[in-house]
Structures are given as structure tokens and as C-alpha cells.
Image: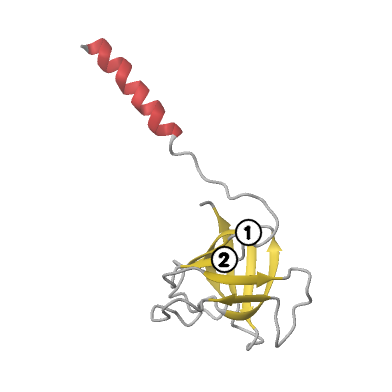
């Protein structure tokens, strides 16, 4: 019986240790992927548990919308007011859970690095941007 315990326990320990490997987000280019809101540059931090996922088919999913929306992003377009270079729309979704800093409408977006996305509304010059970090799915 003791031999069985000595065999089973290390095996279970090894299996559980292997399944809890840390997740490293892919170091990829572009907006496609899952992003977590990590900083709001105006100091308001009530929405830091907010996620947005952009897929390769032009669909976007956000924490505060119950259905998928659409997006278009032109990384090479000069970021300027009032047009921006990112457009996110949730035309088929209920907006009752939408927060003040939800990702919707026209925005100016750029990458600080391949895993950091800065997004700001086209209606604001300073203090309105938010920072997202790429995360694992």
C-alpha cells in the first residue's frame, strides 16, 4: 500500500505541475488577439477587468457587449482627428452594460510595442486614452 502511495502521489504532483505552466502572450504583430485593459490615463480605474478580442475576420468581442461587433483597423493610416484609424461597432448588441470607456466608435490606436495597444477616442486630445496588453486566450 505504501508503495502505491509513493507511486501515485509523485505522478499526480507531476501532472498538476505541468498543467499550470505560465501563459506567455504571443509576440505577434497586429491587432488580432485578446487584449486586457491595464491602464486608463485619466486615473479612473473602475474598468480594469475589461477584455477585448479582435479576430482575423473583422469581428470584435468586448466584456460589456453580449454579442460580437465589427471592426476595421488601418495600422498604416496616419492617426488623426476626427477620423482615427480604428472603427468598432456593436450595431446588433444591447448597450445597457456599456461603460464610459467602452471600445466603440471611431478611435485613434497605435502600438507601443507588439503586445501593448493604446486606444483613444477621436473626440479627445489628452487624458482619454486607455492601454491594453495582449493576453493569452
The answer to whether 134 appears left or right of 74 in the picture is left
Residue depicted at x 36% and y 28% = 13
Colour setting? secondary structure
Q: Where is residue 10 in the image (x, y as percent from the top left)?
A: 35, 22
Quadrant containing the N terminus in the rendered view: top left
Farthest-out residue, left: 1
Q: Position of residue 6 (x, y in %)?
A: 30, 16
Task: Using a 10 Å C-alpha cutoff, classify the residue at mark 2 as few (fewer than 14 neighbours), some (14 to 19) or many (20 or more).
Answer: some
Residue 60 position by quadrant: bottom right
Circle 1 SS class: loop
The residue labelled by disc 2 is 59
Residue depicted at x 43% and y 75% = 46
Q: Distance between the residues labelled 1 and 2?
A: 7 Å
Residue depicted at x 44% and y 39% = 20
Q: Where is residue 7 in the image (x, y as percent from the top left)?
A: 32, 15
Residue nearest the observer in this picture, 70 or 54: 70
Amino acid at each position: 500500500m505504501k508503495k502505491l502511495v509513493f507511486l501515485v502521489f509523485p505522478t499526480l504532483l507531476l501532472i498538476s505541475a505541468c498543467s499550470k505552466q505560465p501563459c506567455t502572450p504571443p509576440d505577434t504583430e497586429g491587432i488580432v488577439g485578446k487584449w486586457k485593459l491595464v491602464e486608463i490615463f485619466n486615473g479612473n480605474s473602475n474598468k480594469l477587468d475589461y477584455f477585448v478580442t479582435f479576430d482575423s475576420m473583422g469581428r470584435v468581442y468586448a466584456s460589456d457587449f453580449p454579442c460580437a461587433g465589427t471592426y476595421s483597423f488601418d495600422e498604416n493610416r496616419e492617426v488623426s482627428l476626427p477620423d482615427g484609424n480604428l472603427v468598432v461597432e456593436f450595431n446588433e448588441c444591447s448597450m445597457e452594460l456599456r461603460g464610459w470607456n467602452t471600445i466603440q466608435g471611431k478611435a485613434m490606436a497605435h502600438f507601443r510595442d507588439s503586445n501593448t495597444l493604446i486606444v483613444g477616442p477621436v473626440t479627445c486630445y489628452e487624458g482619454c486614452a486607455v492601454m491594453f496588453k495582449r493576453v493569452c486566450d
